[in-house]
Image (tube, grey):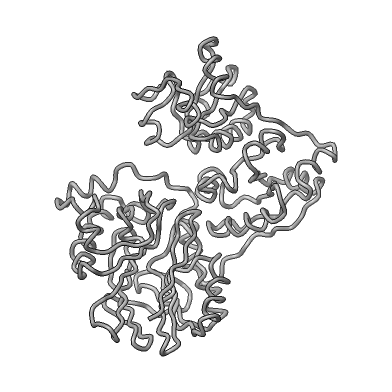
Amino acid sequence: MFFQQILRTDIGCAAYVVASTDAGLAAVIDPRIDMVDEILDLLQREGLQLRYIIETHNHADHVSGHHQLAAATGATIAVSALAGVTYPHLPLHDGDELELGEVVLRAIHTPGHRPEHIVIAVIDRSRSREPWLVLTGDTLFVGDIARPDLAIDGQEGAAALFDSLHQRLLQLPPGTLVFPGHVAGSLCGRVNNRMTGTTIGFEARNNPALQILDRQTFIRFMNENLPERPPNLARIVELNRAAEPPRMGMATPLTPARVRELIEQGAVVLDVRSPAFFAASHISGAISVALDGGQFQNRVGLVVPPDRALVLVVEREEDAHRAVKMLAVIGYDQVLGYLAGGMAAWERAGFPYRTLPVLTVHDLARWREEDPTLQIVDVREPSEWAEGHIPGARHIPFYRLPERWTELDPSRPIALVCGAGTRSALAASLLRSRDFPRVYSVEGGMDAWRAAGLPTTRGAVVTA
């Protein structure tokens, strides 16, 4: 048996190639759209023919590459009979098996994350008749369980997930290797572990969710502290169910004059440079989401409408090509191009630009003591806030600012704080797009605040 895991750590996705080297036949499970070329290269290098492209479910967090792989290889796409897809496919039912010589792939129906979800048990008959490993998709992760609220009611999803885990997955031999569809970075669970594999037995003994044997307690646990759901999830599911292959945006160089025209026509400027570059100079109204700031796609999905035309501002031309691919992964296919020559070209053209003032934590500490009108807004996640925050700060996660900006007084200065300074620049760009005049980003965020020994507190969110 041949086995290869393919990882994308940006939003924690994993795909798998399983094959029989004797038969020369392969299957790929849960391929992402930006993995297609890598998979084709791997198949050619190993001398393998792709027979099946298997989807464990209709993915909500990333666009699949099944259309492109099928077109390139002639392989059959196999997906649950309950998936409701409109492309040609082989419908899989519980217990169905696909053969690749001595390697057998068995579908096991495990609803909960989504109603159609299946996992793939992999058997190498040259060694044993029992599964050697199981590809768990979005059902069981390393140290975590998939969230139950993306496709159906969270209570109903958690109840189905409880049965899938205890009646199906945990019935596999304890030594069965587990390879999940996600590692840390995914919104499909609360996983923060970058380990890429585990075993059924280890998870049965050590996974917190699997220690909960009471159904109602499990249902409550699985619906607590879930990551925010980006509004583009439904769009991604429909793209993955559709008969037509998904599109990609364009990394086309655009003159400053053309960019200005597109902005006037309603395009959104997405500035993917570092917070420092954004602070030094940016186009008025631009949204700052750093390409290399972590969680790029998830953050874009939380603050930028998926159906809007986009124009990119980048540091380097290669960043534009990378950003277009990363945006295509989450269904953002309306990228029209990027500002050729960057902000230097924009400024040379004589077009107006803005800057974002940045505070050190020592600046903020002094200002906080001297000026009672200062509004300190912590834009981190609730779990981060609970671990400690600046006394007197208000908590508004950055993705809530578009709906909660009216809670802030635009006549008073606002200092935005996150973990290290990336999300505060994003938050500042959102407030600037609402014409807040006195917005500041705190360099280094709470990491720098704590390192400087400045005071923190725990407690309720400040609402006054």
Kindly indicate the quadrant of the structure image that contains residue 227. Answer: top left
* Residue 344 percent across, percent down from the top left: 79, 41
Q: Residue 110, relative to residue 212: is it above or below? A: below
* Residue 241 percent across, percent down from the top left: 46, 67
Q: Quadrant of the C terminus?
A: top left
**Going 23% across and 63% down the picture, which residue do you hit?**
164
Q: Nearer the viewer, residue 263 or 175?
A: 175
Q: Is residue 4 left or right of residue 42?
A: left
**Going 35% across and 74% down the picture, which residue do you hit?**
81
Q: Nearer the viewer, residue 340 or 82?
A: 340
Q: Residue 7, relative to residue 215: is it above or below? A: below
Q: Residue 217, relative to residue 136: is it above or below? A: above
Q: Residue 461, relative to residue 254: is it above or below? A: above
* Residue 240 percent across, percent down from the top left: 48, 65
* Residue 256 percent across, percent down from the top left: 80, 46
Q: Residue furthest right?
A: 349
